[in-house]
Image: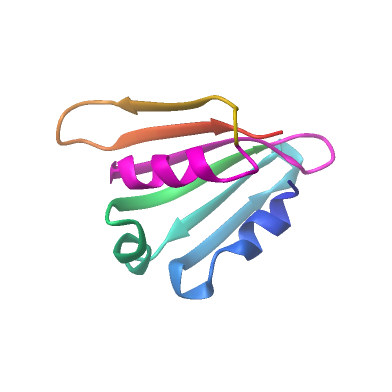
Amino acid sequence: MQVEDFINNFPQEYVESVEKNYENKKARIIFTSNINNKYNGHIFHVIMILNDDLSIQGLGFMGMDLRPLQEYINNYNIFEGLPCHFVVIMDGFPQHLSAVAR
């Protein structure tokens, strides 16, 4: 999946800002609090690691409660059958969810 397609997939009411650093093969979406109503969690941002052709190599979500988002990613056909790791950094502190794309 191309990074622009992924970024444009999010409705604008969920996106506060987008940072693109294609030279370093990274991009980041900072979310508004509206996205938390959709996923019943507390999601802050997603960092995308890119391949040379600007397709997504991996995603890293940061937030306080990412379990609903993990369920969504596990059922999303782009990531079906691919690694999706959920890590609690420390109780009460941000959690990290990473997924590997095709």
Image location of residue 31, percent across then percent down: 42, 60
Image location of residue 54, percent across then percent down: 78, 44
Does residue 36 show up magenta in the picture? no
Residue sitting at 48 percent across and 66 percent down?
A: 15
Image location of residue 90, percent across then percent down: 20, 26
Residue sitting at 54 percent across and 32 percent down?
A: 99
Does residue 68 show up magenta in the picture? yes
Q: Residue 58 lies in what quarter of the image?
A: top right
Image location of residue 38, percent across then percent down: 35, 64
The answer to whether 89 appears left or right of 56 in the picture is: left
Residue sitting at 38 percent across and 28 percent down?
A: 86
Residue sitting at 71 percent across and 58 percent down?
A: 5
> 13 above or below 62?
below
Q: Which of 20 and 64 is in front in this view?
A: 64
Whether residue 29 is visible here, answered yes or no, is yes
The answer to whether 25 appears left or right of 35 in the picture is: right
Q: Residue 59 lies in what quarter of the image?
A: top right
> 9 above or below 43?
below
Q: What stretch is highlighted in magenta?
A: 50-79
